[in-house]
Amino acid sequence: MNTREWAPIAACADGTTPVARAWSEEPLPRATSVWGSGDSPSIARSFAAGARAFIARLALHPGESVLDVGCGTGNLAILAARAGARACGIDSAPNLIAQARLAARTAGSIVAFDVAQAEVLPYHDGYFDTTVTMFGAMFAYPPDRAATELLRVTRPGGRVAMANWTPEGFIGHLLRAQASLVPLSSGVPSPLEWGNEEVVRWRFRGGLTSLACTTRTLELRFPFPPAAVTELFAAAYGPTVAALRTAGPDGASQLRDELTRLFHHYNLATNGTTTVVGEYLDVQARVS
């Protein structure tokens, strides 16, 4: 396995450069191929209200340094910057980082975005006051390494805040439907394990002074019918993209049918659009 030194990434909003660590090149192309296509902003916009509520609960202070891990198109990082934080965001998919930079410029927000992996973060120990991740780091592999990295880059007394889909919620049903047709590789745990409080406590063991987990819900709203939402996920939602690529023609057709059935079954809208309720575990941790 080849390794190289991480070139310094763009400066954070305070002008400092959060800096250089070694990382493995091997997982990045795989992550990029899964998340690096399609209309990802449409999926991010579907739960924008939930993202705003997540950041609002943190009550960020002006000048607080915040890292958004698995930032996608920048939802949380831009909201943090609007709250006065010095914000950085990382994602494994270069196209998502490009979209995040454009979104920040459009919003008039100063955020440093760069391509990096949740399991090998390119920052010094204790660099950030608060580290956040909303449906991002839960997909990193191996998860124990991602947990270690979230703690490592957060200063003692700082916070780690996560939003992780639960097995019982709508996205949990969707991901399990995909796994029933295309099982995870041997030894790879389900990302939905991050939606279990006991698993979270185990992965963060020894690194916290306090941990509070709360089950919450948010609405995912799409301005088109369920079948069109299925096609959006097939083009832009990483786990669905990966499952369809692996399933073969018959399996892919079966999976599309099952996803459309799920979107129809859980749809709350009656006007030709789609609204489903996703359940997630809100994790608020204080680093020791």
Image (cartoon, rainbow, N blue to C red):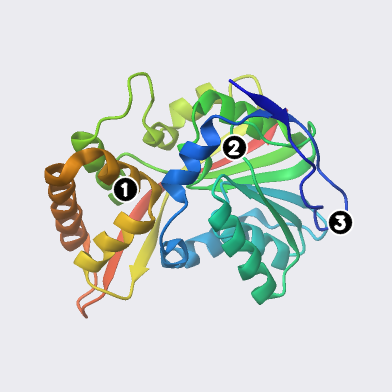
Amino acid carrying mark 1 in the image: Thr
Q: Measure how far apart labels 3 and 1 are at the Cα level.
A: 37 Å
**Looking at the image, which residue is at 18% across and 53% down?**
256
Q: Nearer the viewer, residue 120 or 203?
A: 120
Q: Measure how far apart labels 3 and 2 are at the Cα level.
A: 22 Å
* Disc 2 element: loop
**Looking at the image, which residue is at 71% across and 45% down?**
130
Residue under numbered circle 3: 14
195 vs 4, left or right, is: left
Residue 32, position in %: x, y? 50, 45
- The answer to which image quadrant residue 239 occupies is top left
**Looking at the image, which residue is at 33% across and 20% down?**
186
Residue 179, position in %: x, y? 25, 36
Residue 111, position in %: x, y? 73, 60
Amino acid carrying mark 3 in the image: Asp
Question: Is residue 114 in view from this perspective?
Answer: yes
The image shows residue 17, relative to residue 141, as above or below, that is below
Q: Residues within 10 Å of mark 2 (few under 14, many from 20)?
A: many
Residue under numbered circle 2: 118
Q: Nearer the viewer, residue 283 or 223?
A: 223
Amino acid carrying mark 2 in the image: Ala
* Disc 3 element: loop
- Quadrant that contains the C terminus: top right
